[in-house]
Amino acid sequence: MTGLILQDVKKSFGKVDVIHGIDLQIESGEFVVFVGPSGCGKSTLLRLIAGLEDATSGTLAIGEQDVTHVEAADRGIAMVFQSYALYPHMSVAENMGFGLKMTGSSKAEVKNRVSAAAEILQLEPLLDRKPKALSGGQRQRVAIGRAIVRQPKVFLFDEPLSNLDAELRVQMRLEIAKLHKDLKSTMIYVTHDQVEAMTLADKIVVLRAGRVEQFGSPLELYRNPDNIFVGGFIGSPRMNFLAGTITASGGGTVTVDFDGYAGTAMTKTIEGIPDVGSKVMVGVRPEHFTDGGSTKLEVRIDVIENLGGVAYGYAGAETDAPLTIQLNEGHTAQEDAALVTGFDPDRAFLFDAKSEKRLR
């Protein structure tokens, strides 16, 4: 197994800076997910690691080897793309073994590695089929198998589940997680889907505009976001943000009055005390609303989504701060009616409205 180290890696296309000095250390055997909105640079960063793009500056090491200027074929990586990129005239076995064949591996070695990968991915009954006779999930497993047979130092996945339907995405997430558990290899996975990131990753790299906003375990990012962007991106449904004003400050606590919603003020303990009159954003996750919360809000429910095991109420759709509220089983909330709900201030997050950084 092999880890990776990126030091001040930058990438520019002409005068356009895309990756802005990223420092990152990925431990051997970790499953790391790059996540962020479209255009944040996650696929470009993956291509830099793969050697498909040259870094403008900075260094990149895989294991003990500096691979900054090493060709992609010599980096010891294998990549799985969003498109399956299978040869339609070849069988599953031929597709999986083609790369080994081209590098001069013996027929016996190719057969052994393909058989081993097929067993891991449950592709043994399909080895003689052509890609046109496979489902989308089966084709993606073949593409992953083609990577496995190379026995790479590092696996790279570039949004491999984007072409699958919702049910297959869930199934393939489980299969990729099991694959990592079985192989114990270093894997880097790119997605814009934070659910994939939360369910697959040992560590998540949250990217925005070519910069790392935060790097840590899924629960660390969920429980302890550094800024509004991370707080809003990690978690589904996304975190609610309520505009407020500091009306009292001192003794290790602050009091916040909410702008636009009736209810009680929030008193919260924090270390750094902002000035009275400071504008803040209070982050509350939908699942943290409860009837027993000490900070109360009175809202008008616009729409209720009943999803079976859980329901969500949506309020303030016409405002700048719409709310998503998870409703408890047996709730009495009704559409077009007022609802008094609350939350525990200890579970809320406080952010500076201007810098968007967390106030702790």
Image: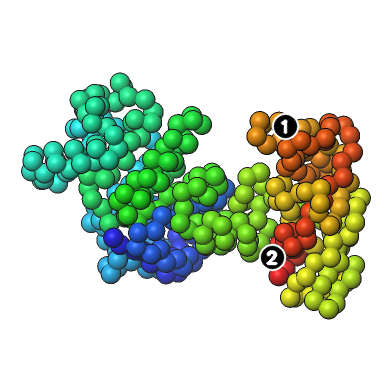
Q: Which of pointers 2 and 1 indicates the residue nearer the eye?
A: 1
Q: Do labels 2 and 1 touch, CB within 8 Å?
A: no
Q: In this view, does 60 lie to the left or right of 119?
A: right
- Mark 1 Cα shell of 10 Å, populated few (<14), some (14-19), many (≥20): few
Which residue: 77% across, 58% down? Answer: 344
Check the picture and name the quadrant holding the N terminus: bottom left
Image mark for residue 357? 2
**45 or 334, nearer to the observer:** 334
Is residue 43 visible to us here? Answer: no
Amino acid type at mark 1: Glu
**How far apart are labels 2 and 1 at the CA level?**
32 Å
Q: Residue furthest top?
A: 133
Residue 220 percent location from the top left of the image? 57, 61
Residue 101 percent location from the top left of the image? 14, 41
Residue 106 percent location from the top left of the image? 8, 43
Residue 355 percent location from the top left of the image? 72, 65
Image mark for residue 305? 1
Q: Which residue lies furthest to the bottom in this view?
A: 251
Q: Earlier in the sequence, mark 2 or mark 1?
A: 1
Which residue: 87% across, 41% down? Answer: 339
Q: Which residue lies furthest to the front in this view?
A: 330
Q: Is residue 7 left or right of residue 206?
A: left
Q: In this view, does 209 lie to the left or right of 61?
A: right
Q: Is mark 1 on a helix, strand or loop?
A: strand
Write down the quadrant of residue 86 in the picture: top left
Check the picture and name the quadrant holding the C terminus: bottom right
Is residue 202 visible to us here? Answer: yes
Write down the quadrant of residue 146 in the picture: top left
